Image (cartoon, rainbow, N blue to C red):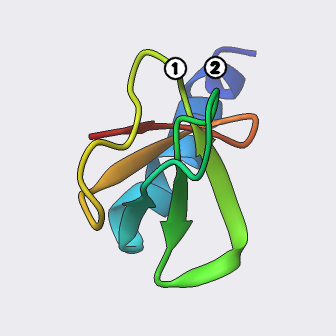
Amino acid sequence: MIMKFHVIPLLFFLPAVFGWWNCELPTGRGDSGRCIEDGDSAGYSACTEDHPCNVQGNGCTPIGSRLAHCS
């Protein structure tokens, strides 16, 4: 039971460590941008409102549930 709680955060942390994640600028009103892994726009996560993409190509970190903290 204890092991389960240690493995789940690790699953969200590993993709951020072994991949390059960069943000794309917002495209319209109400959009915070998106976080793209290694230039593959098919597998992206939306940037959160409190951590939007401010500079094209800046790093970002997926936090799960297809959301990411961007910079």
Q: Amino acid at mark 1?
A: Glu
Nearer to us in this view, 30 or 62: 30
Q: Residue at x 24, y 58 (%)?
A: 58
Q: What's the residue at 28%, 67% (across, down)?
A: 57
Q: Nearer the viewer, residue 39 or 62?
A: 39
Residue 59 is left or right of residue 27, and the answer is: left
**SS assignment at label 1:** loop
Q: Quadrant of residue 48?
A: top right
Residue 7 coordinates in the image, percent (x, y): 61, 36
Question: Which residue is labeled 2 in the image?
Answer: 5
Name the front one of labels 2 and 1.
1
Residue on which the image places disc 1? 49
Query: Between residues 53 and 9, which one lies in front from this camera angle?
Result: 53
Position above or below: 27 against 53: below
Labels 2 and 1 touching (C-beta < 8 A): no
Q: Is residue 17 left or right of residue 2?
A: left
Q: Within 10 angstroms of label 1, few (less than 14), some, or many (20 or more) residues?
A: some
Q: Quadrant of the N terminus?
A: top right
Give the image location of residue 62, x and y in percent: 52, 45
Total marks in image: 2
* Location of residue 43 by image quarter: bottom right
Estimate the x, y position of residue 36 in percent, counting from the top left: 53, 67
Report helix, strand or loop for mark 2.
helix
Residue kind at label 2, given as amino acid type: Phe
Closer to the chain start, of discs 2 and 1, is 2
Question: Label 2 vs label 1: CA separation?
Answer: 27 Å
Kindly give the residue lying farthest to the bottom in the view shown. Answer: 39
